[in-house]
Image (spheres, grey):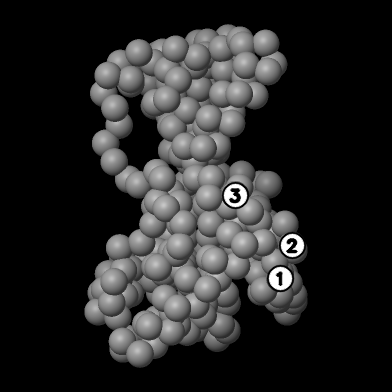
Amino acid sequence: MDPREFATDEDIFAELIAYNKKFGESCLDLTGPLAGFMDSISTAKDLELLRQALGGNLLNYLGLSYGTVLGQNYAELYPENVGRMVLMQFFSWCNETTECTLSGKDLPTIFLNLTSTTSLPTTSLPTTQCHDAINQTLNGDASAFSRMLALNNTDTSPESDFAANALFCQDFGSSLTSSTDLKSLVEVASTLLQLARGAGQAFSPEVYCANWPARVLDPPRPLNAEQVAKLPTIMMLLLYGDTSKAMDEFLINGMLPSQGIALDS
């Protein structure tokens, strides 16, 4: 991670927020008006226009990972247009499937050994690619992480974090106003995420969104109860494994699991 993310004095924090502002302004200048509508609410409205263009049938939607945020916003905005919707966050995936190259291995120990002997970057690689990159590193080839670092420093790569920064900054913004705030965030994150030494997925956006020049359009908030009451049943999953069978049954046939059933993961 950029050392400025762990700024502990006001001078370095001032450098950080000045960088954020300049970087954000360059995004606005180079991208144009679109850069001001990267948030999930705007994208949900785009999805509604796409639904209308395709004939106006009810929207059947599968949202994975950050796709759950988009699905939630669409459902709240257009409850009458929702057909079958599944929102799923991946959790404990690797040891539940042979598709993962690290399946069956002691993942916490592997991660601790790597981070104690190397300086792995905070990664936004998809789950399977991240596991593959760690497995390659164990075998002496850390080029997957090296490529990611290089790509994150180019504004033309589709694998860059730049677009994600713009999205997160308009969805969540940042609560940081001083180096004291940042130090507190590092301390709390390091306590809660000891394996990753505080480097969670949401840490970088929180830091790089401080003083971002675009408006926050989708801040965390309670759902609109009146809109939610209009929704059909939505399936929400936190695990991956046999739950995928229940998910398929719901999306294809509209069938929900029996009340109280426990699904293996």
Q: Which residue is mark 1?
A: 154
Q: Which residue is mark 3?
A: 33
The quarter of the displayed image where residue 134 is located: bottom right
> Nearer the observer, disc 3 or disc 1?
3
Question: Would you place residue 34 above or below residue 136 in this image?
Answer: above
Q: Residue at x 47, y 37 (%)?
A: 41
Between 142 and 33, which is closer to the camera in this rendering? 33
The amino acid sitting under disc 3 is: Pro
Question: Would you place residue 170 above or below residue 73 in this image?
Answer: below
* Secondary structure category for the residue under label 2: loop
| Residue 206 in the image, given as x and y percentages of width and height | 40, 64
The quarter of the displayed image where residue 14 is located: bottom left
The amino acid sitting under disc 2 is: Ser
> Nearer the observer, disc 3 or disc 2?
3
Q: Residue at x 45, y 62 (%)?
A: 213
| Residue 53 in the image, given as x and y percentages of width and height | 68, 18
Q: How many marks?
A: 3
In the image, which disc is placed on residue 238?
A: none
Say which label, 3 or 2, has the lower sequence index.
3
How crowded pointer 3 is (Cα within 10 Å; few <14, some 14-19, many 20+) is rated as few
> How far, Cα to Cα, is label 1 from label 2?
6 Å
Callouts 1 and 2 close, C-beta under 8 Å: yes
> How far, Cα to Cα, is label 3 from label 1?
21 Å
Say which label, 3 or 1, has the lower sequence index.
3
- The answer to whether 135 appears left or right of 170 in the picture is right
Question: Is there any visible trace of residue 31 in the rendered image?
Answer: yes
| Residue 235 in the image, given as x and y percentages of width and height | 44, 23
* Secondary structure category for the residue under label 1: loop
Q: Which residue is mark 2?
A: 157
